């Protein structure tokens, strides 16, 4: 049991009796506050890591408590897709490349930009996982506009189809876990490439 679970009832009682009814307020307990004064590269890195980590947490619960918690698949896949997008953009910039203006939410364009950026890195120090890029390409083909896991239908009311119709969520969980590790490793490899070129 976590410290929070152990104290959740008492914390909830405090919350119920707090005259402050805002959604956002300074923390009464300094251990439970989150700060947003950080910016730039560090912030973007935390964003893609956070989306991938939250996808893993949701997928794990969906697997462990299937089928009761299978509604978590939608936020899990939205977080996964958005995490891929932000991670690619961050790694392209981190490696000294630039994001094409036409990229938007297009994972295929970002994969190509990532490949072009990686060509300029030290080959002895840089490893691009083709499996990682292949996995991202799969989701790019299924959800090219970044809408399939956010909305059930188009603006005109027509349904947004998701193909294939049945996915193995256990495989999805482990593939997502591997993807997160690949992105973390890639950050370290980019740094090593800088050092070898210095």
Image: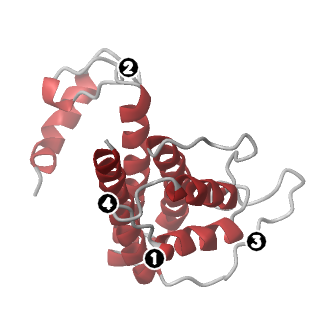
Rendering coords of residue 100 (x, y %)? 69, 44
Q: Quadrant of the C terminus?
A: top left
At 86% from the left and 63% from the top, the residue drawn is 158
Which residue corresponds to mark 4?
A: 185
At 35% from the left and 19% from the top, the residue drawn is 37
Rendering coords of residue 5 (x, y %)? 15, 50
Q: Is residue 12 left or right of residue 1?
A: right
* Closer to the camera in the image, 123 or 173: 123
Of callouts 3 and 1, the N-terminal one? 3
Which residue corresponds to mark 1?
A: 172
Q: Secondary structure at mark 2?
A: loop
Of callouts 4 and 3, the N-terminal one? 3
From the viewer's perspective, is residue 84 above or below residue 35?
A: below
Q: Nearer the viewer, mark 2 or mark 3?
A: 3
Rendering coords of residue 13 (x, y %)? 20, 32
Does the CB distance between marks 4 and 3 fall below 8 Å? no
Q: Nearer the viewer, mark 4 or mark 3?
A: 4
């Amino acid at each position: 049991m976590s410290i929070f679970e152990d104290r959740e009832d008492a914390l909830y009682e405090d919350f119920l009796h707090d005259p402050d009814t805002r959604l956002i307020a300074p923390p009464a307990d300094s251990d439970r506050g989150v700060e947003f004064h950080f910016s730039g590269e560090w912030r973007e890195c935390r964003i893609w890591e956070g989306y991938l980590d939250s996808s893993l947490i949701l997928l794990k619960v969906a697997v462990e408590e299937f089928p009761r918690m299978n509604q978590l698949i939608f936020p899990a896949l939205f977080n996964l897709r958005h995490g891929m997008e932000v991670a690619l953009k961050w790694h392209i910039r981190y490696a000294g490349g630039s994001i094409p203006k036409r990229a938007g939410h297009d994972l295929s364009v970002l994969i190509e930009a990532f490949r072009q950026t990686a060509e300029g890195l030290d080959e002895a120090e840089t490893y691009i996982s083709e499996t990682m890029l292949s996995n991202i390409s799969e989701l790019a083909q299924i959800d090219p506009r970044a809408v399939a896991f956010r909305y059930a239908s188009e603006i005109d009311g027509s349904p947004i189809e998701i193909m294939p119709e049945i996915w193995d969520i256990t495989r999805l969980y482990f593939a997502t876990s591997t993807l997160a590790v690949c992105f973390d490793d890639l950050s370290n490899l980019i740094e090593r490439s800088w050092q070898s070129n210095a």
